[in-house]
Image (spheres, rainbow, N blue to C red):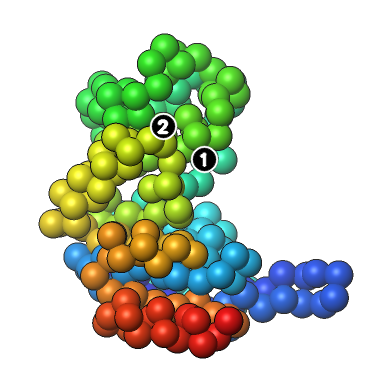
Amino acid sequence: MIELKNLTKAYQTASGMHVVLNNITATFPSRTSIGIVGRNGAGKSTMLRILGGAEQPDAGSVKRVGRVSWPIGFTGGFSPSLTGEENCRFVARIYEADVDEVTEFSRGFADIGAYFSEPVRTYSSGMRARLAFGLSMAIDFDTYLVDEVTAVGDGTFQRRCREAFAERRQRSSVIIVSHNLNTITQYADRFALLERGRLEFFDDIDTVKRVYEQAA
């Protein structure tokens, strides 16, 4: 479970302060998959980084109950000089998980062949995302944070992603952000719209779609 209270985040731009999250109070309950939809620049990735603790809000608080993953679409946490395998082993030790199990699961899931033993700096962006996804699925979290990563890879990899989430959703929460309503529908049970700094929750995707289009 994650609780937000009076959460605010703004960035300085050439035209002044841009508020992306404006005094948001919300609860993301346990064992519930929530899809947050919003346009590019609405603050979806910022929201996800704050939920995971990678970024701090300007005001307000975040309360986390249980283990929360890093944003799965975020690959900046890898050390580029280390190989994929070395990065997996390092992360497994941080989370006190079985190092060999995490490494072998990540190797199989990412399916990047010999590159798994090469420095991450040699990877394409897609390969980094595949490794990040595999590594996150290799470690048990109470809440999984997902940032558009399910669009990575071919049909086989995307099907593997859906199957992995279907299994994780039986025991964990999933919070996924996207500008694509179809992606949100595949992975979420409840929905939220992030628009002009506000977060509004809905129980059905048709209502979200109507409000989303009206706000265009």
Q: Nearer the viewer, residue 160 or 129?
A: 160
Q: Report x, y in % for residue 210.
A: 42, 85
Q: Quadrant of residue 28?
A: bottom left
Name the residue at 30% across, 65% down: 185
Residue drawn at x 82%, y 77% is 16
Residue 94, visible in the rendered structure:
no
Tag 1 near tag 2, CB within 8 Å? yes
Mark 1 vs mark 2, CA separation in Å: 9 Å
**Residue carrying label 1:** 75
In the displayed structure, 205 sits above or below 80; it is below
Badge 2, how many Cα within 10 Å: few under 14, some, many 20+?
many
Say which quadrant the N terminus sits in: bottom left
Say few, some or many: other residues with alpha carbon within 10 Å of mark 1 (under 14 / 14 to 19 / 20 or more). some
Q: Say what amino acid the circle numbered 2 marks.
A: Leu
Residue tagged 2: 131
Residue ID at (42%, 47%) = 151
Q: Position of residue 9 (x, y in %)?
A: 62, 74
Residue 71 located left or right of residue 136:
right
Mark 2 falls on what kind of element?
Answer: helix
Q: Quadrant of residue 17?
A: bottom right
Q: Residue furthest left?
A: 170
In the rendered structure, which amino acid carries the disc numbered 1?
A: Thr
Q: Secondary structure at mark 1?
A: loop
